[in-house]
Amino acid sequence: MKTLIQLFLCSTILLSMFGCSKPKIDDEAIDRIIPAVQKFAEVDSFDYELGFEAPLTNGKLYGSCILDELQLSLFLDLASNGMKAEKFAEVYIVDQTAYMNALGQKQKQKLEWGNMPSFSFDPETVGFDKEMFKENLKAASIEDETLHFELKDEIVKEASAKGNINFKELGIEEVNQMSIDVEVSNDFFKSLTLTFEGLNNGEKVSVSAYLKLDSINEKKALEFPKDLDTWPLANSDNSGD
């Protein structure tokens, strides 16, 4: 899970640097990113899947979410060296209470967050600069509803050298290319895939991280386990605290 978060934090940093001016750059692909970013302000419910795939390991987080009076379901699947663990952990949030089940150990905890903050996803908020975006790209194209971007080699090598991601832990000794594919539907992000390519013991390997959204703005309520009320409070055995 830490590796997955690192991958997407790195991608966020790189996206803020994006750009290029070669003939392979299709401005329409870049222009389609802006309304997709703005549309995030209109999202209030969705199904999601967030995962990564590497030579030796893969994992995914998936579930559903309603932002208004937050409701959330989250499941974690892991696989490594041929071993698989489906629903290794599960989390539910409803009525300002988080319910967690890891390896059969269930507990719940009240969340004290007050009013949920609101977010505005517009170009000014995320600092989107089209020209800077282009300056760091070596390719940008669009096919049907899929946008494809490739970072310049020197940008990829710089990110790798700075250690934003420990690629060796993922099975890549030397990273030489990063690409991003974004699928849009009605100007909403449908999926985003980051692909890192490189060498390991002289052989070509790749690592990918992805985010998929579905059923956008279609959910009114989520289904939860019927026994949530019976899950014990976290640290309930230390009620004297």
Image (cartoon, grey):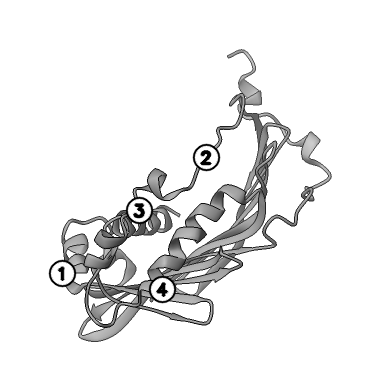
Labels 1 and 2: the sequence-earlier one = 2
Q: Which residue is mark 3?
A: 128
Q: Which circle marks residue 129 in the picture?
A: none
Q: Which residue is mark 1?
A: 154
In 3D space, how far apart are the residues under numbered discs 4 and 1 (Cα atoms)? 24 Å
In the image, residue 59 sits, relative to residue 70, either above or below, namely below
Q: Which residue is mark 4?
A: 28
Camera-nearest label, 1 or 2 = 2
Camera-nearest label, 2 or 4 = 4
In 3D space, how far apart are the residues under numbered discs 2 and 3 (Cα atoms)? 16 Å
Within 10 Å of disc 3 (Cα), the crowding (few <14, some 14-19, many 20+) is some
Q: Which residue is mark 2?
A: 119
- Three-letter amino acid code at the position of disc 2: Phe
* Residue 49 picture quarter: bottom right
Q: Residue furthest bottom?
A: 203
The x, y position of residue 111, in whole percent, is 62, 28
Verify CB contact (< 8 Å) between mark 2 and mark 4.
Answer: no
Q: Secondary structure at mark 3?
A: loop
In 3D space, how far apart are the residues under numbered discs 4 and 3 (Cα atoms)? 15 Å
Camera-nearest label, 3 or 1 = 3
In the image, residue 71 sits, relative to residue 151, either above or below, namely above
